[in-house]
Image (cartoon, rainbow, N blue to C red):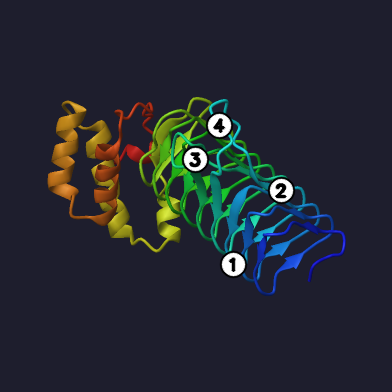
Amino acid sequence: MIDASARIEAGAVIGQNVSIGPYCTIGPHVSLGDGCRLHAHVNLTGHTTIGARTVIHPFASLGSPPQSVKYRGGPTRLVVGADCDIREGVTLNTGTEDDRGVTQVGDRCFLMVGAHVAHDCLVGSSVTFANNVVLGGHVTVGDSVMFGGGVAVRQFVRIGEGAMIVGLSGVRADLIPWGMAHGPLAHLIGLNVVGMRRSGVSKAEILLVRRAYAALFFGEGEFRGRLDQVEREYGGDARVRKIIDFIRAGKRPLTMAIRRGDSDEDL
């Protein structure tokens, strides 16, 4: 199961039923879970843990030092979950001493060709990165987020659960759970209704979230007052509650511009 041309340094931990292809290199502080499969020319280095059954394709490089001028060479970590699919040329860096000290990717994530997750990012489970998506340092991504091809996310941005970012968008501000963003300087253009449907949310529940969204972003009065009103009227719904909690948990106000789409006209 291990090709003769692979180089595995002493100290690496290799689980059961692991397949390691030609010319892979594995450092002394790497741990591979059971059933992992490495195609040819995979580089695993640093203090890196890979979850069970994760598949890594050629020329991916995981666990290399953070691309940060503040990094001081400490034993920071990279943790990748189980059942991930990591395609060609993906790069994942370890954390830095000045933040979490760890970069983390959850379970069942799909990282397509050329995706990059920078230092100290925290990525949830079931997240999809299309080709050439790049996350700056310290970004937080919720579960079930979908990134279109070529999306770039600025440092310290938060992306809420179930959000969708259209390809070639540049995200410089927090995006609410189930929000949809689009544009070179991305605008909030509505809700990821398709994503909610695919996850089994009923039509009635989706309509309720849409009404709450309309009241929050297109209602009268100041935003803080609208947020309180939406919490009183719709806060019993689990998805609306997550949107409210996400906004209140932010260290800075929401600054993503809002663009009303055709689908909002009947709300």
Per the model, the C-alpha gap separating discs 2 and 4 is 22 Å
Mark 4: secondary structure:
loop
Q: Note whether residue 267 is visible.
A: no
Mark 3: secondary structure:
loop
Residue 6 placement (x, y as % from top left): 82, 59
Query: Please, which residue is most extreme toward the bottom here?
Result: 17
Per the model, the C-alpha gap separating discs 2 and 3 is 19 Å
Mark 2: secondary structure:
loop
> Amino acid under label 2?
Ala
Kindly identify which numbered label has been placed on residue 60. 2
The one of 3 and 197 positioned closer to us in this rendering: 3
Per the model, the C-alpha gap separating discs 2 and 1 is 17 Å
Q: Quadrant of residue 100?
A: top left
> Amino acid under label 1?
Ala
Q: Which residue is denoted by mark 3 in the rendering?
A: 120
Per the model, the C-alpha gap separating discs 3 and 1 is 22 Å
Indicate the quadrant containing the C terminus: top left, top right, bottom left or bottom right: top left
Residue 187 placement (x, y as % from top left): 43, 29
Lower position in the chain sequence, tag 3 or tag 1? 1
CB within 8 Å, label 2 to label 1: no
Kindly identify which numbered label has been placed on residue 52. 1
